[in-house]
Image: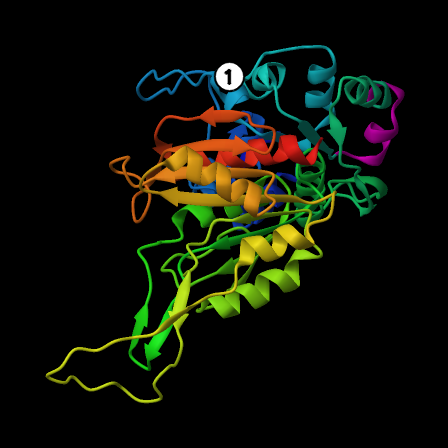
Amino acid sequence: MQGKHIIVGVTGGIAAYKTAILVRELVKRGAEVKVIMTEKAKEFITPLTLATLSRNPVLVDFFDPTDGRWNSHVSLGLWADAYIIAPATANTLAKMAHGMADNLLTTTYLSARCPVFAAPAMDLDMYAHVATQENLQTLRTRGVQMIEPASGFLASGLEGKGRMAEPEVIAQFVADKLQANLPLTGKNILITAGPTYEKIDPVRFIGNYSSGKMGYAIAETCAQLGATVTLVSGPVQIKAQHANIHVTAVESAAEMFQATTTAFSQADAAILCAAVADFTPTTKADSKIKRGDSGMCIELQPTQDIAAALGSAKKDTQVLVGFALETDNEAANAASKLARKNLDFIVLNSLRNPGTCFGYDNNQITIIDRNGQTKAFPAKSKQAVAADIVENLCEWLNK
């Protein structure tokens, strides 16, 4: 649920106390949560509690009574990636089934373009009543996903079906449904990011300016779209956030080669975004090399070529994506690398584009594929560039 926009609608039932736990669970999973309450819901749990847990003001009225600010149900419906109504009382379910829009909660339901989930909560006889069951069926046929109530001891003192599902169950149900609709669900994506350091001695190395921002942005985007991501990362100062990203930390080109070639056989696609050293010292000193009066020569040898190794091992069902950072003859050099390494497409960026590439938050790319098609993009944030790259990846995975 990392980065998802979730609206939680709270109606006037005793189970509203559980909604505080639900909101906390959604926030823990990385979602941004906004809460809409009915007036009756405020009699069971305070807006202050839910505002504190959601880290957003709670919405009740169409207008903020303190300053007249409009709480737009249309904007809320467009903002949300999911709308969870918990508890969903018999009264609110009836209003939803019949298209009534007499409060902010039901009006937002009618405006929502996102998946809608309802967790019914009421006494067993109310739940079993034919009117309630017909309303539930009507809502199901319209796409509302019901989170079935549990059986057990009820507030009335009776025992039976009608208890709202536990907050953790609701959160997991929604997470599973949102995951199932994502384009990379079930895919394993291998990504490399950051620089490599090639040791000269215990305190010195040959490296480059890569920050890892581009590779990590691609990893986060893939994970948000449902993929399980293996991120082989050189030394960087940033951390992966999404729970579906599994980081393998390496330092040298040799370590990155080993980790990447090992993981590739299980991957549906690999995106080679790391700035891997092309050369490494032939020998590494065991102790610090002391300064002298004369010059110093370091003999270098080529590192193992990760892209070429994966390109030669690539199966027809796998997609392989490379990067090319160029300073001159950009398109020709990128096209040559694309062919030599058996890539499906290559992402070209140029150091001649000011304010992009190493260390910057923006990038400007051109995607060239093996069919000769070229897509040029304007400068964007690296998060937006990641979205463009992953969108192209999804197209290739679906071919």
Q: Is residue 32 left or right of residue 85?
A: left
Q: Is residue 4 left or right of residue 355?
A: right
Q: Is residue 255 above or below residue 147?
A: below
Quarter where residue 356 is shown:
top left
Among all residues in the image, which is located at the extreme bottom?
A: 287
Q: Is residue 197 above or below residue 383?
A: below
Q: Amino acid at mark 1?
A: His
Quarter where residue 284 is shown:
bottom left
179 or 99: nearer the viewer? 179
Q: Which residues are magenta?
A: 122-132
The quadrant of the picture occupied by the C terminus is top right
Residue 7 seen by the camera = no
Identified at 83% across, 30% down, the residue is 127
Residue under label 1: 73
- The rendered magenta stretch, by its main secondary structure, is classed as helix
Identified at 53% across, 28% down, the residue is 36
Magenta residue check for 129: yes
> SS at mark 1?
helix
The image position of residue 171, as x and y in percent, is: 65, 44
Q: Is residue 288 above or below residue 265?
A: below
The quadrant of the picture occupied by the N terminus is top right
The image position of residue 260, as x and y in percent, is: 58, 61
Residue 181 seen by the camera = yes
93 or 242: nearer the viewer? 242
